[in-house]
Image (cartoon, grey):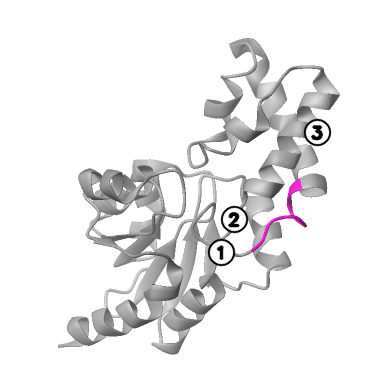
Amino acid sequence: MSSPSLLTVGFDLDMTLIDSRPGIKAAWQALSAETGTFIDADEAVTRLGPPLDTELAYWFPEAEIPAMADRYREIYPTHAIAPTPAMPGAREAIEAVRALGGRAIVVTAKHEPNARLHLDHLGMKPHALVGWLWAEAKAVALREYGAQVYVGDHVGDVRGARAAGALSVTVPTGPCPEHELREAGADVVLSDLTELPRWLEEYARTRVA
């Protein structure tokens, strides 16, 4: 599946390609109302990136987490897809990869069917989508597709890129500020995805040279 000669750029989803805070907040509020369990949805959306079980552990006993995770994923499409916008420059970033003859893949910790719903709703068409992978585990998919670059917003994304031997390009549009991304080992920090097409053109020229 991988091809060293083909430009392949991986992207994280939450807070990289999509601003999932409004949708995830609505999903947490719905789960809270259904279960009668207090969940501070505003606080929860400040910690986006890690797997769902990590956040559930703040609000539910360990024994209840698997069932609550299943229920959250069931109600997620009803509450979270429509309110979630694309991040500025997200569509253009994916198209910039295509314009260079490359392929864009999305590698996310999110439940893959729900991630697909977001991409379809927003009209984003990556070459491939791989879900259920977080931090270093993302390297499995990045290596499989031969990604030379991985774009994300979280220190976990930096760790995934480094584990895959890919260039870590980051945007401080999620919970991790620029200094944390740099301290984690990010190779590049852009202000947001609107800067990616220009950076990518330069990277592609350097790579060919």
Q: In x, y percent, where is residue 177? A: 36, 47
Specify start and end residues of the magenta stretch as a single range.
80-85
Decide: marks 1, 2 in contact (CB < 8 A)?
yes
Give the percent coordinates (x, y) of residue 189. 29, 61
- Could you tell me the amino acid type at mark 1? Met
- Tell me: 181 left or right of 151: left
> In the drawing, does residue 99 fall left or right of residue 207?
right
The image quadrant of residue 38 is top right
Residue at mark 1 to residue at mark 3: CA–CA distance: 24 Å
Q: Which residue is mark 1?
A: 87
Tell me what residue is drawn at x 56 percent, y 64 percent: 87
Give the structural element (helix, strand or loop) at label 3.
helix
Q: What amino acid type is highlighted by mark number 2?
A: Asp
The answer to whether residue 92 is above or below residue 90 is below
Q: Residues within 10 Å of mark 3 (few under 14, many from 20)?
A: some
Image quarter in which the N terminus is found:
bottom left
Residue nearer the viewer, 100 or 92: 92
| Tag 1–tag 3 contact (CB < 8 Å) | no
Q: Secondary structure at mark 1?
A: loop
Residue at numbered disc 3: 30
User: How far apart are labels 1 and 2 at the CA level?
Assistant: 6 Å
Find disc 2 in the rendering and name its residue.
19
The answer to whether residue 6 is visible is no
